[in-house]
Amino acid sequence: MDDRISLNQDRLSLYLDGRLDDVETQALENELRKNAALAEELRRLRALQGLSEQLGFQPGAFTADEIRFRAAARSRRIRKIAISAAAVLLVVTHAAAFLIGSTRTETGAATEIAKETPAVPRIPHISDRAEPIHDAEQLLGEFAKLDPGSTPHDQLNTRLVSLQQRFDEESFADRLNDVAASADTGERQIRAMGLAGTFEELHRVFENGGDPGIVSLMVASIARKSLKGEMAVRFPANLDEYMTVLPLSQGTFRVVRIVRRDGKTFREEEILDLPALQTKYNVRVQANSTRGKR
Amino acid sequence: MPSATDEALAAGLIGGDARAFDQLVRRWRDRVVDLAALLLNDRHLAEDVGQEVFVRLYNKPAAYDPSRPFAAWILTVTRNLCFDSRRRERTRSKYHRRAVEDRRFGPNPAERPPESAATAEAEARLRQAIAALPEPFREAYVLCAVRGFSYEEAANVSGCGVKTISTRLARARKRLVERMSRWL
């Protein structure tokens, strides 16, 4: 549709509705006299308008009372829906609360049981410790967990006896010698040695090989003392003092002692070479000698 | 209160006057339904829309602001509900729509006997042609050309400017002339 026709359409529509001012009306009427097509368009528009005005009126068929009834019915329906929704919500909420409550009860019960159940006896594992030393308080705790009711001292004694029973003196010494001779790298074993009192670990070290120096040193000390019927003095004998020995470089050792005095725990550390170590701690170590333990 | 204005009646309804509602229904029922019928081209839907308009007025009379013309308010509500109804209709299945087609206006001899068969057919065609107009054009045409609203009143109901109504009306007329050329 070009603009001129569009403009004429608008003008004719306005003219039909009497919305043109006098000047515009006069101008359009002059044009209509000259332009037959425009006049024909106006004729059709008038015919359409006449037909449109004759369109039948469609009356409503309801009354005010019917509207009131419908409004009341809707209110009842809305109320019913609201009540249903509230009921559903209540059920869901209660169900959720019940489920959550049950879970809480179960969780709570589990917690209670866990509290009442003694800790599973656990032997400190090698990999559990980055450092071979742990303080005396922790050690005491570990022992206490192993056999509730017995004193740490009893524990240690039991373990020593058990160890002694497994190996007679000769075979034990031979075994130590074998360990020393195997010359396996010592880190893992040494750490095991550092875990005071973990004789099972110690035994495992024996089985799997061990560092000749440190294993011989430590185990010989323990074994000798225990075989003589003494408690291991410098290994966790009475739990007031224990010691770890770590090889640092060739021929030197770091000796760490945890000592309890007057209810307090002290950590003492020193670097010793092998002769000094033997002298200070009264051990004689000959790596390849089964008699070195005495 | 026969001479009370619509606005006064509506204010009375807001204040709890039950008789005001009766009067408003009597005054506006036919105009509301007729407008809906013209916009929807479906007498049953128009009746539903008409009832819905008054249910809303009854339930929430305060939705009307008495400081504004009641006519514009109620016709605007009617218009909006018609468009809502039409949108709902569009979403229904084609089978349902087919049934709706059967209810559409045609010659209705029971209500107003046509002067002749040709006139009746022309009227039916015109209703169909109006129903086929885009919503804005249809609204402008129904309000101004069919029911004689002024451009200003139509603009008030439609929520647009007078110039827009004028343009929409011209466009609607052009389309209808093209569609109804046989009967004009």
Image: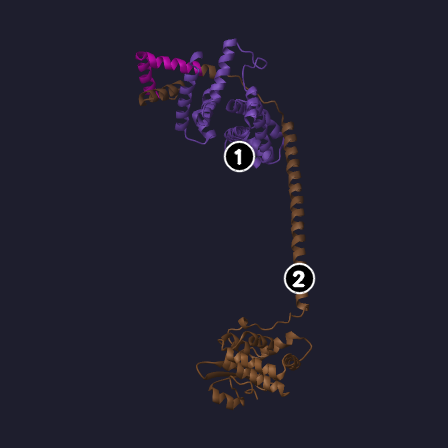
Measure the alpha-carbon separation of dots 1 and 2: 64 Å
- The brown one among the chains is A
If the image is split into quadrants, where does the N terminus of chain B sit?
top right
Q: Decide whether the magenta segment is chiefly helix, strand or loop.
A: helix
Q: In the image, is residue A29 part of the stretch drawn in magenta?
A: yes
Query: Start and end of the magenta stretch?
Result: A20-48
Question: Up-down: is A114 above or below A155?
Answer: above
Question: Up-down: is A195 above or below B83?
Answer: below
Report x, y in % for residue B132.
47, 22
The local secondary structure at tag 1 comes to: loop
Which of A111 and B144 lies nearest the eye of the viewer? A111
Which of A29 and A171 lies nearest the eye of the viewer? A171
Crowd rating for badge 2 (residues with CA inside 10 Å; few <14, some 14–19, many 20+): few
Crowd rating for badge 1 (residues with CA inside 10 Å; few <14, some 14–19, many 20+): some
Q: In the image, is residue A211 part of the stretch drawn in magenta?
A: no
Q: Which residue is mark 2?
A: A108
Report x, y in % for residue B24.
58, 28
Quadrant position of residue B145: top left
Q: Which residue is mark 1?
A: B66
Q: How many marks?
A: 2
Report x, y in % for residue A18.
39, 19
Which of B53 and B136 lies nearest the eye of the viewer? B136
- The purple one among the chains is B
Instruction: Using the image, tell me which numbered label, if any, was put on residue A180.
Output: none
Which of A49 and A282 lies nearest the eye of the viewer? A282
